[in-house]
Image: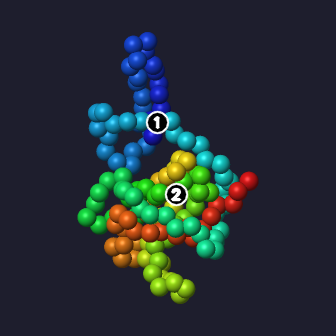
Amino acid sequence: VVTVLHRSRDGRIVARVEAMYEDLAQGDLVRVLPTYPGSPGVVAAPFEDGPVANVVAYAQEHELHQPGNFLFLDLGADDGVGVGDEFIVEFGRPEALVEGRAQVVSVQDEVATARITMIRNPVFVRGIQMRLDRKMPTR
């Protein structure tokens, strides 16, 4: 997270780094930090028979994905997915054991970015299916 302090006429920018979650490098791309609707204490509620998404890629490939890693799902706002919604990896429905959980942090029309919040076994691989399990309330 950076704050722009000065913009020159020739396009140069001076910014202060407010928070870092990974190393920064010359050439890294930036975008406007989105604002998220919501109120303190509002959490995702259980959602029955949610749609299934496929994990299409990861922000960074790791031998073993862990909490904090980001993944990309093939469902987005057009499918009713919103920021704060939670997807799970489960096996053995109807008495499913949740093997992994990820929370949506960014949504575009056809895709969503989610952050892994829980993993029981190394289930996070490209192509794994995740089901919408918890949904943020809509206004």
Residue bearing the label numbered 1:
31
Q: Position of residue 53 (x, y in %)?
A: 49, 64
Work out which quarter of the rendered image holds the N terminus and state it. Answer: top left
In the rendered image, the vertical position of residue 109 relative to residue 132, given as above or below: above
Asked whether the residues under the numbered discs 2 and 1 touch, taking CB atoms below 8 Å apart as contact, a structural biologist would say no
Image x and y of residue 90, in percent: 47, 77
Quadrant of the rendered structure where residue 128 is? bottom left
Asked if residue 133 shows in the view, the reply is yes
Residue at horizontal 61 percent and vertical 47 percent from the top? 36
Placement of 13 over or under 111, stated as above or below: above
Please state the horizontal and vertical placement of residue 122, each as a whole percent of the image.
33, 73
Q: Is residue 121 left or right of residue 39?
A: left
Work out whether mark 2 precedes mark 1 in sequence or the reverse, and give the earlier one.
Answer: 1
Q: Outermost residue toward the right?
A: 139
Which residue type does callout 2 highlight? Leu
Residue displayed at 59% across by 52% down: 78
Q: For the residue labelled by badge 1, is the local secondary structure a helix, a strand or a loop?
A: loop
Let me know if residue 118 appears in the view: no
User: Residue type at mark 1?
Assistant: Arg
Instruction: Answer few, some or many: residues within 10 Å of disc 1's Cα (few below 14, many 20 plus, some between 14 and 19).
Output: few
- Give the farthest residue toward the top: 9
Which residue is depicted at the point 29% across and 33% down? 26
Residue position for label 2 = 75
Looking at the rendered structure, the secondary structure element under dot 2 is loop
Q: Nearer the viewer, mark 2 or mark 1?
A: 2
